[in-house]
């Protein structure tokens, strides 16, 4: 085989290895193993690997032993670009793309927005001595109650509230809606098998769908909750599992109210439609990246398709959005499409398409790479920054006064602000509707008080109103 042929074979082999990589296998992508796989000497494999690193085609991780990864394949796995060809360790590589930095509740999209009140309540409940306080999560199907319960358990582990050996268990109450014996055995165990309350070893037990329980089964859970109200500090209290209950109806509903009366902390989890626009964008992008990782492809989506996903209502909330994204990606997937998956408007289900009116630039493709959804209008932003730097250079060279520099700088910032306000991307139908209502009002106010309120004023007010109406989100999707 020719030298170039061997080098190409090595690259293709590393591509296949990287595509199928798992945390357990990635440590074996060493020079020795790769040389053995393609039947070449270790020295020749080392030479080709380092040449490919210099060519920017593979990534070198200087751990012990040194490992190599196909760059493009690993970028598709991470759904994030790699900006270097060498890293001192795998930890440093993952940290450079933000993997592994978020802990427990920080992993939740919207943890600092619409989910912040829920998380504060969960933290307080989990931390309360001696064994936490029971919590009732109320929210529609698919809004993320199970995920919050899992993150609450991770929070307890990370904060040392429970031991490192403590576990997490979920019980689907719907399966025991009319099975009293089975429910008791699952919770408390029997002569031969311990129940989940004991098996978690002081961890967390998630009772999902308590509003589906029959009257007798409900009394069992309520009796259990009563024990927590009587708990006092001591060894036995430390071994008691923390309880998180969930229902898909409001706490005031007939089937949930018995629990709402005895559970001290009731957490109302927002539905998808109550989440901010920026959160819904992040959720859609997250699910798109997950599909890209699954099929080992770089995913892009048209601006119109993303807006339709974000504005659509799903009966199953976040779970419904996830299912829709999988459906769209499967429709858009074309075998042998050169590692790229493009989702366009016509890949969406008909009921989702009807959620949004067509707009200008709907065919513009957006990258789903992590961190890309907020990097829009880069050319306009770059132009503003370049103007500011040029003005500063002239000030440093004493070519202009500080007053002239300030005037130029303000001008550049205002130009960019005008682009954000009046550019095509800002032409949201809801904002335009609000603006049409506001225009005559502002004209009347201006005439009555002898002040000039420009079109910019009505546009800004309209955008602010739209943001408030849509849940404090960012009411626009800008193309890359």
Image: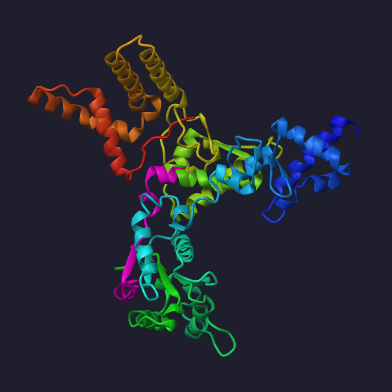
Residue 383 position within the rendered picture, expressed as x and y whole percent measured from the top left? 43, 20
Q: Which residues are magenta?
A: 255-281
Residue 411 position within the rendered picture, expressed as x and y whole percent measured from the top left? 31, 18
Quarter of the rendering containing residue 2: top right
Is 143 or 416 nearer to us in this picture? 416
Residue at position x 39%, y 35% in the image: 476
Residue 150 position within the rendered picture, expressed as x and y whole percent measured from the top left? 48, 63
- Give the residue furthest to the right: 1
In this rendering, is residue 202 above or below 317?
below
- Give the residue furthest to the top: 399
Whether residue 390 is visible, yes or no, is yes
Query: How many marks overall?
Result: 0
Residue 84 position within the rendered picture, expressed as x and y whole percent measured from the top left? 62, 35
For residue 448, side relative to residue 399 (left or right): left
- Give the residue furthest to the bottom: 191
- Quadrant assignment for the N terminus: top right
Whether residue 434 is visible, yes or no, is no
For residue 239, side relative to residue 233 (left or right): right
For residue 83, side relative to residue 319 (left or right): right
**In the rendered structure, does residue 75 fall within the stretch colored magenta?**
no
Quarter of the rendering containing residue 337: top right
In this rendering, is residue 465 above or below 313?
above
**In the rendered structure, does residue 262 fall within the stretch colored magenta?**
yes
């Amino acid at each position: 085989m020719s030298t170039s042929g061997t080098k190409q074979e090595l690259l293709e082999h590393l591509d296949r290895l990287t595509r199928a990589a798992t945390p357990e296998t990635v440590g074996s992508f060493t020079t020795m193993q790769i040389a053995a796989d393609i039947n070449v000497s270790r020295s020749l494999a080392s030479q080709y690997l380092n040449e490919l690193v210099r060519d920017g085609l593979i990534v070198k991780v200087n751990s012990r032993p040194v490992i190599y990864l196909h760059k493009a394949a690993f970028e598709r796995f991470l759904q994030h670009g790699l900006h270097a060809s060498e890293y001192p360790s795998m930890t440093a590589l993952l940290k450079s793309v933000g993997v592994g930095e978020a802990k427990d509740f920080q992993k939740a999209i919207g943890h600092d927005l619409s989910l912040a009140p829920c998380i504060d309540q969960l933290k307080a409940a989990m931390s309360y001595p001696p064994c936490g306080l029971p919590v009732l999560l109320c929210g529609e199907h698919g809004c993320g109650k199970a995920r919050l319960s899992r993150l609450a358990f991770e929070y307890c582990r990370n904060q040392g509230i429970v031991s490192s050996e403590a576990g997490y268990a979920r019980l689907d109450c719907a399966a025991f809606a009319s099975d009293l014996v089975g429910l008791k055995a699952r919770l408390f165990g029997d002569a031969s098998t311990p129940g989940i309350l004991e098996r978690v070893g002081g961890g967390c037990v998630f009772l999902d769908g308590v509003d589906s329980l029959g009257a007798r089964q409900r009394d069992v859970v309520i009796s259990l909750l009563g024990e927590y109200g009587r708990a006092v500090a001591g060894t036995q209290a430390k071994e008691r599992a923390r309880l998180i209950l969930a229902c898909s109806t409001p706490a005031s509903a007939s089937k949930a109210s018995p629990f709402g009366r005895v559970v001290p902390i009731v957490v109302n989890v927002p539905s998808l439609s109550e989440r901010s626009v920026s959160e819904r964008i992040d959720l859609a992008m997250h699910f798109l990246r997950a599909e890209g990782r699954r099929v080992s492809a770089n995913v892009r989506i048209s601006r119109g398709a993303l807006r339709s996903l974000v504005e659509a209502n799903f009966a199953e909330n976040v779970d419904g959005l996830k299912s829709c994204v999988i459906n769209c990606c499967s429709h858009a997937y074309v075998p042998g499409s050169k590692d790229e998956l493009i989702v366009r408007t016509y890949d969406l289900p008909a009921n989702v398409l009807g959620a949004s009116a067509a707009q200008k630039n709907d065919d513009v493709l957006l990258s789903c790479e992590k961190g890309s959804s907020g990097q829009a209008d880069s050319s306009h932003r770059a132009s503003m920054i370049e103007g500011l730097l040029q003005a500063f250079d002239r000030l440093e060279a004493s070519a202009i006064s500080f007053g002239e520099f300030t005037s130029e700088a303000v001008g550049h910032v205002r130009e960019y602000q005008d682009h954000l306000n009046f550019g095509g991307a800002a032409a949201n139908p809801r904002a335009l509707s609000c603006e049409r209502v506001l225009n005559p009002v502002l004209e009347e106010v201006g005439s009555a008080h002898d002040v000039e309120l420009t079109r910019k004023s009505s546009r800004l007010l309209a955008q602010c109103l739209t943001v408030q109406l849509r849940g404090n989100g960012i009411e626009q999707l800008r193309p890359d």
